[in-house]
Image (cartoon, rainbow, N blue to C red):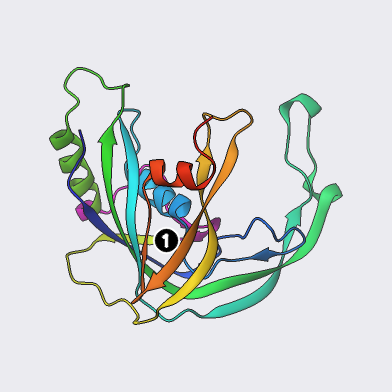
């Protein structure tokens, strides 16, 4: 079973949806990725019983760039390696990010096989709307990087998307965790009148060589 389509606006002063092919620097895609959109919705409502499916991402403001340097670490902390001192592993990297962004995410959720007694589509639909109207969330939504916080709100049918049409090339879709090791999935994205249509999971699997 699936829910009705929700439209959620996510906006902020900075966003960086990092292109995986850029190793030395963080360089953002031109638009929000489906994975980032899913992350915004899961920050508002995450439950084992539901899975979010992105339908469209509308770009409401002109694409603008900014660049700056920031301190990052070269490796991830590991519990097996004991204490981790960031000062000893710090590097300064350039970031090419988007500024003054606003997106409208159109999405629905489907019920998973991890439902409990009393879990229904209506229950989670009402829970989402309550959280949006009250400004509540499971964790702070962000736009690609955790330090780039997003403000979110419910959005009606009216969006003010930019009238830009252009191919975006291959864009990161999400990870396929059923594959071992997890593999990244990509889709051929296109901005059509300011809107990116997001294909379904099954469509993307076919484009990436099918399920394994």
Side (left or right) of 8 relative to 36: left
- Residue 174 in view (yes/no): yes
What percent of the width, then of the height, locates residue 165?
40, 78
User: In the depicted view, which residue is nearer to us: 56 or 46?
Assistant: 56
Image quadrant in which you'd find residue 110: top left
Disc 1 packing (10 Å; few <14; some 14–19; many ≥20): many
What percent of the width, then of the height, locates residue 90?
81, 54
Q: Residue at x 17, y 66 (%)?
A: 157
Viewport quadrant of the N terminus: top left
Q: Residue at x 78, y 33 (%)?
A: 83
Residue that sits furthest to the top in the current view: 117
* Residue numbers of the magenta segment: 133-150
Q: For mark 1, give the secondary structure.
A: loop
Marks counted in the figure total 1
Side (left or right) of 204 relative to 5: right
Q: Which residue bears the numbered disc 1?
A: 150
Identify whether 40 is placed above or below 25: above
Residue that sits furthest to the right in the current view: 88
Viewport quadrant of the C terminus: top right
Residue 144 is inside the magenta segment: yes
What percent of the width, then of the height, locates residue 21?
69, 58
Identify whether 165 is placed above or below 93: below
Identify whether 111 is placed above or below 16: above
Identify whether 123 is placed above or below 155: above
User: In the depicted view, which residue is nearer to us: 110 or 14?
Assistant: 110
Image quadrant in which you'd find residue 103: bottom left
User: In the depicted view, which residue is nearer to us: 59 or 179?
Assistant: 179
What percent of the width, then of the height, locates residue 38?
40, 48
Q: Residue at x 40, y 46 (%)?
A: 203
């Amino acid at each position: 079973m699936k829910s009705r389509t929700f439209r959620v606006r996510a906006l902020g002063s900075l966003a960086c949806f990092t292109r995986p092919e850029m190793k030395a620097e963080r360089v953002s895609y031109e638009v929000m990725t489906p994975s980032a959109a899913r992350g915004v919705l899961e920050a508002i409502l995450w439950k084992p019983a539901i899975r979010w499916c992105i339908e469209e991402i509308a770009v409401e403001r002109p694409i603008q760039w900014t660049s700056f340097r920031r301190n990052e670490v070269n490796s991830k902390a590991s519990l097996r390696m004991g204490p981790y001192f960031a000062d000893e592993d710090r590097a300064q990297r350039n970031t090419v990010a988007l500024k003054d962004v606003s997106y409208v995410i159109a999405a629905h959720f489907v019920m998973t096989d991890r439902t409990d007694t009393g879990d229904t589509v209506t229950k989670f639909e009402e829970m989402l709307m309550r959280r949006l109207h009250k400004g509540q969330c499971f964790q702070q939504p962000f736009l690609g990087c955790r330090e780039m916080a997003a403000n979110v709100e419910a959005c009606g049918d009216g969006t003010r998307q930019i009238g830009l049409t252009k191919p975006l090339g291959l864009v990161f879709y999400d990870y396929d965790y059923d594959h071992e090791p997890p593999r990244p999935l990509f889709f051929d994205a296109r901005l059509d009148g300011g809107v990116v249509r997001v294909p379904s999971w099954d469509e993307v699997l076919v484009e990436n060589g099918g399920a394994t």
